[in-house]
Image: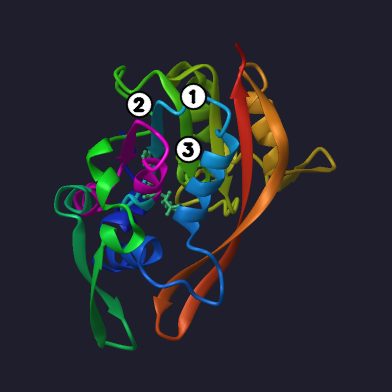
Amino acid sequence: MQNCLADNMYETDALVSQYCEFHYGDSYFGVENYPACCARLCCEIMAERKRGAALDLGCAVGRTSFELAREFSSVTGLDFSRRFIAVATRMAEEGKIAYEIPLEGELAAPVERRLAEFDLDAVRRRVKFYPGDALSLPQEFSGYDLIFAGNLIDRLKNPRVFLSAIHQRLVPGGLLVLTSPYTWLNEFTPRSEWLGGFSAGGRDFTTLEGLRTSLNPHFSILGKPRDIPFVIRETARKYQHSIAEMTVWERCR
Ligand SMILES: C[S@@+](CC[C@H](N)C(=O)[O-])C[C@H]1O[C@@H](n2cnc3c(N)ncnc32)[C@H](O)[C@@H]1O
């Protein structure tokens, strides 16, 4: 199991609220809801393929999992944060959640969101959420047609370990879809484990090169990487605007 200060960040009130709004709240600056956009692109990419079982790794409060369930027969959402999983499970069981969003200083506003607002109420029984560690998945988390890992790799302690084993959880020909803004930070990933974003031996190494190196033995890349912007609201007057890169990898048959 992971065990460092940064892991606990996703258990705090501030981050639970931030991710509830990121997944189920308003869109800001005209940028499409990111968890929904990622799921829509996954479904488009899988349009001609079997859409049986999907795994949403690092699912946070669950929006991508519900969106994937529009097309997939069953979706499993897994996250290291028990508080995120508790919110996602409440959404699956009750079809609604309540949370507060910060305005300024100590001021906050109550928000209630329902799956029905997104036309997702009918699919919620196809989705199950579990707390867990992507770096040591129990054996039963196997046999997926699609694994989506959204903004996860640069939050793992050892992304190479994750990438070297993840093919075992896909069916042959199954797809691994990764998104990440490649925000490498020592508090999540020790510098020695970064996939890219550094110079060595007189040349620059990108994360895309690192992904190719780690995934090459078992995957081939499909299509071109694409940019997906996202906005995370911190307060009424502070937002993070980032651009993730999405790559799609097919497990060798
Ligand atoms: C940057 S957030 C992205 C969440 C979500 N995919 C999204 O795009 O909104 C990273 C997520 O990965 C989870 N996480 C971090 N390390 C993990 C691990 N080892 N196993 C499973 N989840 C992990 C965190 O709890 C957090 O929910």
In magenta segment, residue 129:
no
Q: Earlier in the sequence, mark 2 or mark 3?
A: 2
Residue 100 coordinates in the image, percent (x, y) = 24, 75
Identify the residue under disc 2.
136
Q: Which residues are magenta?
A: 64-88
Viewer-side residue, 75 vs 177: 75
What label sits on residue 151 in the rendered view?
A: none
Q: Quadrant of residue 191?
A: top right
Disc 2 C-beta below 8 A from ligand 1: no
Q: Residues within 10 Å of mark 2 (few under 14, many from 20)?
A: few
| Secondary structure of residue under mark 2 | loop
- Real-space CA distance between mark 1 and mark 2, rounded to the nearest whole angstrom: 26 Å
Q: Residue at x 56, y 34 (%)?
A: 47
| Secondary structure of residue under mark 1 | loop
Regarding residue 163, the answer to whether it shows in the image is yes
Identify the residue under disc 1.
50
> Which residue sits furthest right?
202
**Residue 53 relative to residue 107: left or right:** right
Query: Residue flagged by tag 2: what amino acid is it?
Result: Ser
Q: Quadrant of the N terminus?
A: top left
| Secondary structure of residue under mark 3 | strand
Residue 29 coordinates in the image, percent (x, y) = 55, 77
Identify the residue under disc 3.
148
- Real-space CA distance between mark 3 and mark 1, rounded to the nearest whole angstrom: 15 Å
Q: Residue at x 27, y 37 (%)?
A: 126
Q: Residues within 10 Å of mark 3 (few under 14, many from 20)?
A: many
